[in-house]
Image (tube, rainbow, N blue to C red):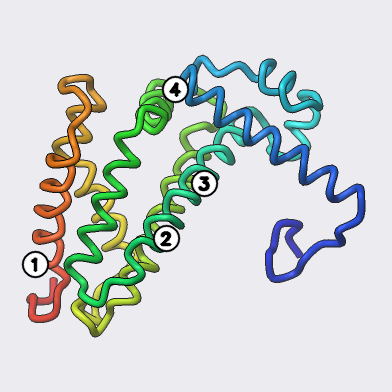
Amino acid sequence: MAADDPTHPQPTNGKHRAADARKAALIHHAREQVAMHGIQNASLNDIIRLAGGSKATVVKYFGNKAGLFAAAMAATARETMAGLTLDTGGEDRLEPALHSLLRGLLTFYLRPDSLAVYRGVVASADASDGLGDSFYREAHLLVVEEVATFLSKWVGRGIRADIDLHDSAGRLTHMIRSDLYERRLLGLIPLPDETAIARQARITTALFLKGVGKGAAPA
């Protein structure tokens, strides 16, 4: 049984509470350091100094520095996706609900801390610390899973039942990162305004629904 399995709560004695608090503090300060300095320049020593513990504590809970940063990125992604899916929960039509989700998702990707993370992960792609793999599994795939869950709620209500939801969600996250995000990631344009973000979300929504919407031809 996994220690973090929410379906099997662990004993809430003082030792477990202290461990949970230390892990939460490490993640919190890792997120702050990444936001301020970027993932490559975030100091593990500063994180430990602020959160308490030691490098052995990081190894015990996260495996290594990359594991801690992956957990920090996953926490940010999880909070973002929870907020986005809640925001679209009141919509009773697929198109405005999907547009709202994609607008929020693109806004998240364009945040300075998100851009810093992506740039840092790409810059360390050939490193042996496992950051790229950890980021892909812990953060990117979490977003894809949440988007797939969102899409699953609309199967038969605007989305065809024969599509692969996970594959479609992965492709959708790539679609929303095209154009504005890619150009901003490369430093080619300033931060897009809300009007530009909404337009990109609207175009992506229409294009995506042409492929997976009810009435579209199967691939």
Mark 4 residue type: Ser
Give the mark, 4 or 2, whose residue is nearer the N terminus. Answer: 4
Residue 2, by quadrant, is bottom right
> Separation of disc 2 and disc 1 at Cα?
21 Å
Mark 1 residue type: Lys
> Separation of disc 4 and disc 1 at Cα?
37 Å
> Separation of disc 4 and disc 2 at Cα?
25 Å
| Mark 1 crowd level (few <14, some 14–19, many ≥20, 10 Å Cα) | some
Image coordinates for residue 88, horizontal then vertical, percent: 32, 64
**Relative to residue 90, is residue 47 drawn left or right?**
right
Mark 3 — residue? 138
Q: Are marks 2 and 1 in contact (CB under 8 Å)?
A: no
Query: Which quadrant: the N terminus?
Result: bottom right
Q: Are marks 4 and 2 in contact (CB under 8 Å)?
A: no
Give the mark, 2 or 1, whose residue is nearer the N terminus. Answer: 2
Mark 4 — residue? 124
Give the mark, 3 or 2, whose residue is nearer the N terminus. Answer: 3
> Separation of disc 3 and disc 4 at Cα?
17 Å
| Mark 2 crowd level (few <14, some 14–19, many ≥20, 10 Å Cα) | some
As drawn, 210 above or below 75: below
Mark 2 — residue? 145
Mark 2 residue type: Glu
Give the mark, 4 or 1, whose residue is nearer the N terminus. Answer: 4
Helix, strand, or loop for circle 2? helix
- Marking on residue 210: 1
Q: Are marks 4 and 1 in contact (CB under 8 Å)?
A: no
| Mark 3 crowd level (few <14, some 14–19, many ≥20, 10 Å Cα) | many
**Which residue is more in the foreground, 37 or 197?**
197
